[in-house]
Amino acid sequence: MKQISIVIPTLDEAAHLGRTLEAARHAAGQAGLDCELIVPDNGSSDGSQALARRLGARVLDCPGLSLGALRNRGAAAAGGDCLAFLDADMEVPPDWLTTWCAVRREDRADVLGLVHQAPPQAPWYARAWLQRLAAERDRPALLDWLPTANLCLERVWFERAGGFDESLRSGEDKDFGLRLGEAGARLLSLPRPTVLNWGFEGSWREWLGKELWRQNSQTQLLRKGRASLRRLRFPLLAAGHWTLDALALLCLLLGQPLAALVAFALGWLPAGLLSLRHAYTRRRPLLAARLALLHWLRLHVAGIALLMDLTNQSARRPSRG
């Protein structure tokens, strides 16, 4: 490994971008790697481009592109034999790239992603929602996909997988990760060290808006890939959740409140099971209760997103926190 190219897509990220760039450069220095910082900018108007240039990053002016296209443009401009993708609100730990070098030296995996968590000042729902990642990834594990909030891989694997799908409105990281696995890459998740996510949701409106945006490509993903249980699971859960809501409403209209209550209670079952599926949350009752509420809300949002997706409507991504 000679040089690492760190690609950080931006759109009005001046509040966090400086911290992200400085932390990434420091991690590269600690690992003894030659590092280039590449910032594909999606048309920022808050000074993000000037800030990135001032901190030594190469800025690519790329207005109006999808997130997948921004990452592809960054990778195309990169000169490193290794690529790293970061969201612009991620503060990586000093040993981020030291850990990546050790993973490659020991041949433990071909792709690395670290768990990220919200800082203490984030609202409880933002902290709890990121803790679900800790619940899902609370020990080193090879997974079938990893988020691109922080992702390290050798360029050869990026090319074998064909890069990111630029047509997807969201979910391009899941699609890319699944194709990496199909190409033969080993994707390793490590719970330590952790990355700080400063783009936490500062309001319920922002949390719901982000979930609507994240779920807005379900049918796109299904159409382009095999309709496996892995891809169908969440859309089916969302559809079933809305069916139970409709049944509860129908029972109320028919004057059957007890049946409506049963249907409503059954609607909480998927959310409860999702919150308790990992031992990490089963040992933390308060976290499990909070996640049950968030999963319940997410299933409602996912049903709306699925309907929008079927009618080819795009959800707008809210501004970061």
Image (cartoon, helix red, strand yellow):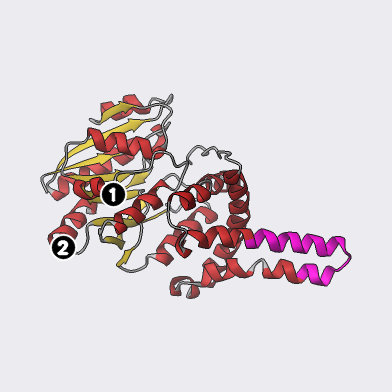
Residue to which mark 2 is pinned: 107
Q: Could you tell me which residue is drawn at 54 percent across and 55 percent down?
A: 125
Whether residue 203 sits left or right of residue 115 in the image: it is right
Whether residue 309 sits left or right of residue 131 in the image: it is right
| Mark 2 surroundings: few (<14), some (14-19) or many (≥20) residues within 10 A | few
Q: Earlier in the sequence, mark 1 or mark 2?
A: 2
Real-space Cα separation, disc 1 to disc 2, in angstroms: 20 Å
Relative to 225, is 25 above or below?
Answer: above
Image coordinates of residue 201 in percent, x first then y, are 51, 46
Labels 1 & 2 near each other (Cβ < 8 A): no
Asked whether residue 271 is in view, the answer is yes
The answer to which of 22 and 158 lies nearer the viewer is 158
Q: Secondary structure at mark 2?
A: loop
Q: Secondary structure at mark 1?
A: helix
Magenta segment includes 137: no
Asked whether residue 94 is in view, the answer is no
Q: Could you tell me which residue is drawn at 77 percent across and 63 percent down?
A: 248
Whether residue 89 sits left or right of residue 1 in the image: it is right
Which corner quadrant of the image does residue 285 belong to?
bottom right
Amino acid type at image mark 1: Ala
Q: Nearer the viewer, mark 1 or mark 2?
A: 1
Q: Could you tell me which residue is drawn at 58 percent across and 39 percent down?
A: 313
Amino acid type at image mark 2: Asp
For the record, the magenta segment spans: 240-261
Magenta segment includes 259: yes
Residue to which mark 1 is pinned: 161
User: Magenta stretch mostly in which secondary structure?
Assistant: helix
| Mark 1 surroundings: few (<14), some (14-19) or many (≥20) residues within 10 A | some
Q: Could you tell me which residue is drawn at 53 percent across and 44 percent down?
A: 213
Which corner quadrant of the image does residue 102 belong to?
bottom left
Image coordinates of residue 55 in percent, x first then y, are 25, 31
